[in-house]
Image: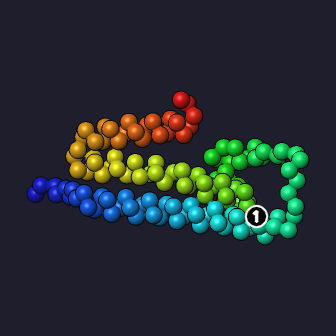
Amino acid sequence: MGRRTRTWSDEQIEQTVGNLLRFGVLLAAGVVALGGVLYLFHYGNTTPDYHIFRGEPSSLRSPAGIVSEALLLQRRGLIQFGLLLLIATPIARVAFSAVAFWKQRDHLYVAITLVVLGILCVSLIGLA
């Protein structure tokens, strides 16, 4: 008995990609909104001092630090984590496209998509 493989139709791929983008943006917006609300509850009544520039703390300057701050439900960490999710959403879309083209056995588009994914990852990490 032969192994049966399922291929995805273009319509299924487009619908899944659309749902992936929608879910990613909504999740990112929800996390940023949660962090923003928590931040406003804590600092909403204070007057900002713009005479001294204070950058982000060192814990929020790396993805690992941002994730750990978000897991601790720190306000600024949640906002930064939501922004990371927003950046990661189109990258996940490209990665999903590579898998979908692989399932469709369209090797040319798999190669092109992997090149695009590599460029996105390299530029995001900052090696270029």
> Residue 96: x and y, percent?
37, 52
26 w.r.t. 100: above or below? below
Instruction: Name the spot of residue 55 as percent of width and height, x first.
Output: 78, 45
Q: Residue at x 61, y 64 (%)?
A: 31
- Locate the N terminus and report the quarter of the image it occupies: bottom left
Q: Nearer the viewer, residue 123 or 107?
A: 123
Please give the name of the residue rendered at 50% of the width and 35% of the height, measured from the top-left corner. Answer: 122
Label 1 is placed on what type of residue?
Tyr
Residue 19 appears left or right of 27: left
SS at circle 1: helix
Q: Relative to residue 122, is residue 102 depicted above or below?
A: below
- Coloring scheme of the render? rainbow
Residue 37 spot, x, y in % from top left: 71, 68
Check the image and name the residue furthest to the left: 1
Q: Residue furthest front?
A: 51
| Mark 1 Cα shell of 10 Å, populated few (<14), some (14-19), many (≥20) | some
Residue 57: where, in percent of width, then height? 77, 46
In which image quadrant can residue 30 be found? bottom right
* Count of marks placed on residues: 1
Seen as rendered, the residue at the extreme top is: 128
Residue at 28%, 42% in the rendered image: 109
Answer above or below: position of 126 versus 47.
above
Left or right: where does residue 62 sit relative to residue 53?
left
x 34%, y 50%: residue? 97
Q: Which residue does the numbered mark 1 point to in the structure image?
A: 39
Q: Quadrant of residue 28?
A: bottom right
